Each structure stands twice: as structure tokens, then as C-alpha cells.
Amino acid sequence: MSDLQKSIVLLFRRKGKELLTEQEFVSSASFDLRWFSPKDAQRLLDLSLTGGFLQRKNGSVFPTFNLATVDVPLDYRPSKDVLERASKRSTDLFSEVVEKIVRAKAVPKREVVSRVNKKQELLGIDVEPAVLLVASDYGLAVDNSTIERAESEILGRDHPTH
């Protein structure tokens, strides 16, 4: 799991809720845990939404993945570059493929992201192969260079060893 996902897990676990208002999320990351300035905590929220890790519902946000499947140490603190890495990732393969599906099939982005998240959780895989599988489900061709790019993005991240 990425630092972004671990951060989300810890924020929700600390509040003991399945839904948080956007303000609760930002306040917890900045004031309660003192991880970020309020501006950077807002960026964390925005990147979590655009990255497909959170969804909005009636003014609140909720995780799109099962929090119980993520182990987070009690003393966890996101690395300083979590926002930079998440920012790069938000313009990565995931976003490009989602946009391609939305344009080609005229389906709402929320629906595509939801399907990717469900596929990711069901199969226990990274977001890149999940989005490629969803693209295939929608009938879009996935070429070898796209698969290689997904592999490169996965291998370029820090993965915990089990």
C-alpha cells in the first residue's frame, strides 16, 4: 500500500468513522496529527480523491478500498514526499486510462473509478493492473507498451515486503 493509502487509513481509524467531512479530513491531517499545513492537508485530500482512493458523497468523503486490509504502524507518519509522489501519480497511467475510458465509452468518471477500485480490492492488486483490466472490460485494447508502463510505475514505488 502507498503512503497515501496508509495516511487515509490512519485518518479514518483515528476518527473511528467510515465517513468524514472534508473539513474533518483536512483538520485531522493538519491540526490533530500535525502532518501537514492546512494547505498541504487539502492537497492530500485532493490527491486522494483524484487518485481514486476517496470518493465524495453528500459533502463527506469515504475510502474506496477496505481499510481493514491495510496494516499501519501506530507511530506511522507519511514521508515528506508523499504529496509529490501522489501528485506525479495523479497524472499517471491510471488517470490517462480512466480518461480514455470516459471519452471512448461516454461513462461517468466516478463509475470507472469505482469499478477500478472494486477490481483492485477483489483481486488484491495495484491500481495500474486494475485500471487496465477495467479498460479491457470496456472493450478497449491494451497494448504491450501500456502494460510495460504499468509495470514500470508499480516497480518504481516503494512496496512493503511481507
Image (cartoon, grey):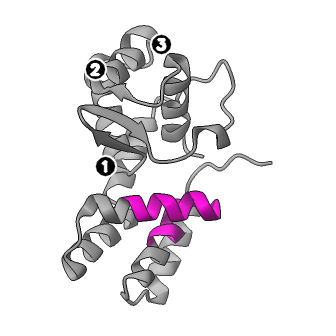
Q: Is 16 covered by the magenta stretch?
A: no
Sequence-wise first label, 1 or 3: 3
Sequence-wise first label, 3 or 2: 2
The residue lying at 38 percent from left, 9 percent from top is 31
Q: Is 125 covered by the magenta stretch?
A: yes
Residue density around tag 1, few if under 14, some if 14–19, many if 20 or more, within 10 Å: some
| Distance (Cα) linking label 2 and label 1 | 17 Å
Residue named by callout 1? 50
Outermost residue, right side:
162
Q: Position of residue 8 (x, y in %)?
A: 48, 33
Amino acid carrying mark 3 in the image: Leu
Provide the residue span drawn in magenta.
114-131
Q: Which mark is residue 155?
A: none
Q: Position of residue 50 (x, y in %)?
A: 31, 49
Residue named by callout 2? 23
The residue lying at 39 percent from left, 54 percent from top is 89
Q: Position of residue 142 (x, y in %)?
A: 43, 86
The residue lying at 35 percent from left, 33 percent from top is 44
